[in-house]
Image (cartoon, grey):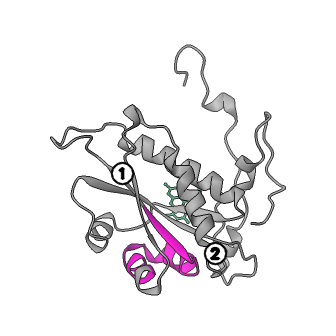
Amino acid sequence: MSTITTRKADHKIDPIHLERWSSRAFSSKPVEDAKLHSIFEAARWAPSAANWQPWHFVYAEQQEDLAKFHSFIYEANVEWCKEAPVLVAVISKKTRNDEGDANITHAFDTGTAWGYLSLEAARQGLLTHGMGGFDRDKAKEVLEIPEEYEVQAVIAIGYHDPEAPLSEKNKAREVPSDRRPLDEFLFEGSFKK
Ligand SMILES: Cc1cc2nc3c(=O)[nH]c(=O)nc-3n(C[C@H](O)[C@H](O)[C@H](O)COP(=O)(O)O)c2cc1C
């Protein structure tokens, strides 16, 4: 992965938080199984309410499986993610027991697992790029996901290739983004507008 030098933190943090970014310039070079296992292992150790671990992942790296993902990801995303060697559906289980009682933190906990995964991927020199731009109903149908599960996101995983062919529009987006300062979202005592 390319090293990002333009991002600056206002307070001391591990540099991996700045180095992880969502480039669209993927190499088609396959991802080693050991690295793939490591990044899902990181997701495995995320905390969750009552340790229910609602996260599930369906990944694709064979051409016929990748084609299934391309069929439900919106065209604007397929345009760049078609080069990515691994695509993953991030899925949460909405229920917490056989009686079908709701797990109200399924999305929160699954988001945490994706966060862990993306940071471990960055440590392994890999790019991850999350996508909300896909047809959720079609994803459930194509991947044969049961009713009580929800597809939260799709992610592309692979190596960075700064020379990857991208549309002019996407080339212009190849700049790591900045963030709002802490004082815009961190409040002491009560929420302040
Ligand atoms: C849940 C989620 C959905 C996203 N959806 C898309 C998407 O559909 N297409 C896209 O190009 N990027 C998508 N992104 C990438 C974000 O735009 C990106 O993470 C954000 O701008 C911050 O940039 P950074 O990841 O480089 O720090 C998504 C990211 C997340 C976490």
- Which label is found at residue 169? 2
x and y percentages locating residue 108 in the rendered image: 43, 41
Q: Residue at x 57, y 76 (%)?
A: 84
In what quadrant of the picture does the C terminus appear?
top right
Can residue 183 be found in the magenta stretch? no
Along the line of sight, which residue is nearer the eye, 164 or 173?
164
Q: Residue at x 56, y 13 (%)?
A: 189
Q: Residue at x 45, y 77 (%)?
A: 75
Can residue 81 be found in the magenta stretch? yes
Q: Secondary structure at mark 2?
A: helix
193 left or right, relative to 101: right
- Which label is found at residue 92? 1
User: What's the magenta region?
Assistant: 66-89
In what quadrant of the picture does the N terminus appear?
bottom right
Residue type at tag 1: Ser
- Which label is found at residue 33? none
Crowd band around label 2 with a 10 angstrom C-alpha radius: few (<14), some (14–19), many (20+): few
State the separation of the CA atoms marked 2 and 1: 32 Å
148 left or right, relative to 54: left
